[in-house]
Amino acid sequence: MTPMTLDQANDALRSAVSERMAATPDTDPKKIGYHKAPPQHPGSLAFLELLEEVRELHMSKSQDYGSTSDPLANIRQGADFVGIEHWRGCMVRIADKVQRLRTFCQTGRLVHEGVRDTLMDLAAYSLLAIVLHDEANP
């Protein structure tokens, strides 16, 4: 008998698992966690994609604003500079973004940053405020 290649062995294992899963009733406790997620509502998919975009934005901007040991160093230092809690320092940045959006609503234009970028920053700062608040209030 010729020995199987690694690819053949993997294919055989996948096939065996698929057959076993198909033969196992959905109510079997061993199958919990293996169910495929129900189809997502299109709005939910767009939301989840935006969350990934916020993650990427945070990772990218942390390189410019944070330090090697603390990705939120800029927010902490700004808050320390004026003597407020770190999460409140984040709230100041949120207020700046809201003011930018107010300006857009009144004038219909922004010079340096678009509405979408401002909203993305607002989402990121909101999450960062939660992180900093949770750190201060474990």
Image: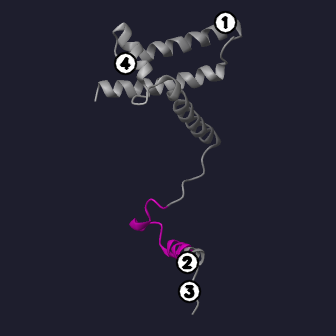
Position of residue 116 in the picture relative to residue 88 (left or right): right
Q: Which residue is mark 1?
A: 106
The residue under label 2 is which amino acid type? Answer: Ala
Q: Which mark is residue 120?
A: none
C-alpha gap between disc 4 and disc 3:
62 Å
- The circle on residue 9 is 2
Label 3 secondary element: loop
Q: For the residues marked 2 and 1, what is the alpha-carbon distance in whole angstroms? A: 65 Å
Mark identifier at residue 3: 3
**Residue at coordinates 60% horizontally, 9% vertically from top-left?**
102
| Residues in magenta, as a range | 13-34
Question: Would you identify the image quadrant in which residue 71 lies?
Answer: top left
Residue drawn at point x = 69 percent, y = 11 percent: 111
Asked where in the image residue 135 lies, by quadrant, the reply is top left
In the rendering, at what x and y percent does residue 74 appear?
44, 19
Q: Which residue: 58% across, 90% down? A: 2
Question: Is tag 4's residue or tag 3's residue first in the polypeptide sequence?
Answer: 3
Instruction: Indicate the secondary structure of the residue bearing disc 2.
Output: helix
Question: Which residue in the structure is indicated by mark 4?
Answer: 86
74 relative to 23, above or below: above
Q: Is residue 67 left or right of residue 117?
A: left
Q: Earlier in the sequence, mark 2 or mark 3?
A: 3
